[in-house]
Amino acid sequence: MERVIRRTRDKAVEAPAATPSRREAKPARAATQRPQAAKPAYEKRTIALVYDFDGTLCPRPMQEYAFLPKIGVDAAAFWKESNKIALEQGADPLITYMHLLYKKAKAAGIRIDREDLVAQGRQVELFPGVMTWFDEIDAYVRTHEQAENVGVRHYLISSGLAEIIEGTPIYKRFHNVFASEYWFEAYDLPYPKRVITDTGKTQYLFRINKGVENLSHSINNHMPENVRPIPFSHMVYYGDGDTDVPSMAVMRKNGGHAISVHAPGKPKEKCIDLFKAGRCDFFAAADYRKGSELFRRTSLLLDRILADIRVEEEIWRLGREIEGKAPR
Ligand SMILES: [Mg+2]
């Protein structure tokens, strides 16, 4: 029922918010099927902040906090072996790690089911300020002088495991979570149900953009830019490295925004590379506390997006006016 509570917090209750999330598992209602009686209003008033997880919201790959220690495997050795197998076998690195994780657990005689993974999520460490970030950002927009009827949504797109993310204290803060996932009952070893690769992440950006978040609906149907509920220009993507390059490229090429983060006090070379290559608008330490550089730079982008929404709304209103369909 927390979905309902959150939905009421979401001020953009018009078209974009009508799109059901994965967890609601209801069929999506196309924008064109909205009741005709509804008072016409400018509908693109949702801002989407989209996050990578590992290295962006938490310092290390999420499997390193509980899964690998539990089966007695050294993290560096695990990733090295996984990448080596993927290279030798010409296998996808994400499928390879998901397979190897459970092969190692089986070899160690440790059974880890879905509930165990969710429980592991509680041990995941988050960067400073992540716990308060969502409320602070929502408050920033809510109290902004240009933010009337504008809502903010937070989305997560991760190659990590949905079950572990579900166990983290921030899971409920996301409007939707797209992450890799296992089948737990189908085979002896859990089998990948959905694998989100670096390039695969971009599919979910388009799902958010087009309002097609129900995964049973194809994302490939053509949808003109002007009817997409959350334009890329209303979206900000947060990532930490090379695995985010496809997502950042999609964002930037489509008029959206991106911010690169690095662990506080750690080298920022990767961020500088991404910045120089035009992959991101800004970079900052992954310090999510109010008053941090990351918060300030995010606020600058939000200021711009809010101003854009007001301009776009006025253009829309003027267009209705000259067609004799003035909205108010
Ligand atoms: Mg990452």
Image (tube, rainbow, N blue to C red):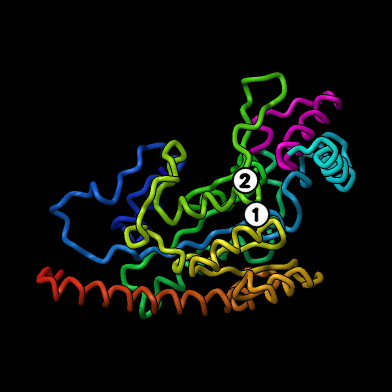
Residue 42 position, x and y percent, is 26, 66
Residue density around tag 1, few if under 14, some if 14–19, many if 20 or more, within 10 Å: many
Mark 2 within 8 Å of ligand 1, using the beta carbon: no
Query: Which residue range is magenta in the image?
Result: 92-118
Report x, y in % for residue 276. Answer: 70, 76
Whether residue 2 is visible, yes or no, is no
Nearest to the observer: residue 85 or residue 260 = 85
Q: Is mark 1 within 8 Å of ligand 1?
A: yes
Q: 87 or 187, which is in the foreground?
A: 87
Q: Quadrant of the N terminus?
A: top left
Residue 165's tag is 2
Tell me which amino acid carries mark 1: Phe
Q: Which residue is mark 1?
A: 53
Residue type highlighted by circle 2? Ile
Q: Give percent across and percent down for residue 89.
A: 81, 35
The answer to which quarter of the image holds residue 273 is bottom right
> In the image, what residue occupies the spot 34% across and 64% down?
44
Q: Answer yes or no: is residue 104 visible.
A: yes
At x 32%, y 72%, the residue is: 148
Residue depicted at 65% across the width and 32% down the height = 192
Describe residue 175's horizontal placement relative to residue 223 as left or right. right
Where residue 110 sits in the image (x, y, percent)? 80, 26
Q: Is residue 112 magenta?
A: yes
